[in-house]
Amino acid sequence: MPARQHAACWLTGAILLGMSSHDAYAEPERGRTLTVVLLALLILTVIGALFGFVLGRREKGDAASDPGSGQSSRPSTNVSTQGASSAVMPCPTFMEDAIKQRDSKAALPLALRLYIRTDKREVWICQEADASSLWYQGHDKRKNFSGVTGSGETPVEGENGLLLSTVTFSGSAGNDKYTATNGATTYTVSREKLTVSGNQTLNEDVKESLPKK
């Protein structure tokens, strides 16, 4: 073989051998790179899943404690409006009619604060709608009691009834007690006693009282 052909064959063989060596070296490198990339993607996927799980739990907890969601994270302790107070009882119509004649500016309707009955008498303590004034209506029974609804004997001023606007609350929390004055005479009304002092004296036990405690 001529020397020139021999040299060309040798150069070609060297190049092919170099390429084969480079490919053999590059193949493991590509495999390791691919493995690293796959591991990185797997780690990122796991981290993303954990982050999404934690975020979802947090959003669920926030929704449960949101007052506008209709749910609460703790039981309601608000019992003040759940049957704690009874409905307001109205006062008799005859009492409102008498008050309108006495004071045209009175705020009606009246709300019953206390009704008591003894063996011979009954008394209403009523409050105006704007809570500005209290009224006392006394009734001495002639034949019948009038009762809370006013369905019986009607008090007549100067005969068997007394209407007073000079009334004050003289009790304490949970202790209904009212005082009305008529000149030198004082009327004290509670759930236990009807007491009159001054120009007239009286002390009677209460047999019935409303509203019920």
Image (tube, rainbow, N blue to C red):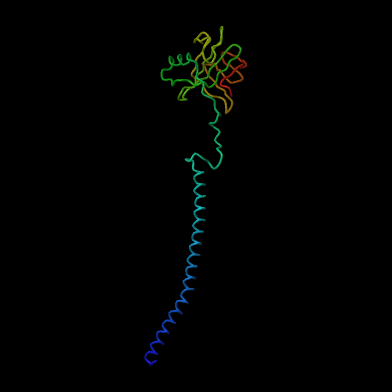
In the displayed orientation, state which residue is furthest to the front. Answer: 1
Q: Residue at x 56, y 33 (%)?
A: 79
Q: Residue at x 46, y 71 (%)?
A: 30
In the displayed orientation, state which residue is furthest to the left. Answer: 4
Q: Position of residue 156 (x, y in %)?
A: 50, 9
Q: Position of residue 191 (x, y in %)?
A: 59, 20
Viewer-proximal residue among 127 and 3: 3
Instruction: Say which quadrant the N terminus sits in.
Output: bottom left
Asked where in the image residue 143 lies, by quadrant, the reply is top right
Q: Position of residue 102 (x, y in %)?
A: 44, 15
Q: Residue at x 50, y 50 (%)?
A: 56
Query: Could you tell whether 155 is left or right of 10 in the image?
Result: right
Instruction: Say which quadrant the C terminus sits in.
Output: top right
Query: Could you tell whether 4 is left or right of 23 in the image?
Result: left
Viewer-proximal residue among 89 and 164: 89
Q: Up-down: is 79 above or below 130? A: below
In the displayed orientation, state which residue is furthest to the top. Answer: 143
Q: Residue at x 49, y 54 (%)?
A: 52
Count of picture labels: 0
Viewer-proximal residue among 48 and 3: 3
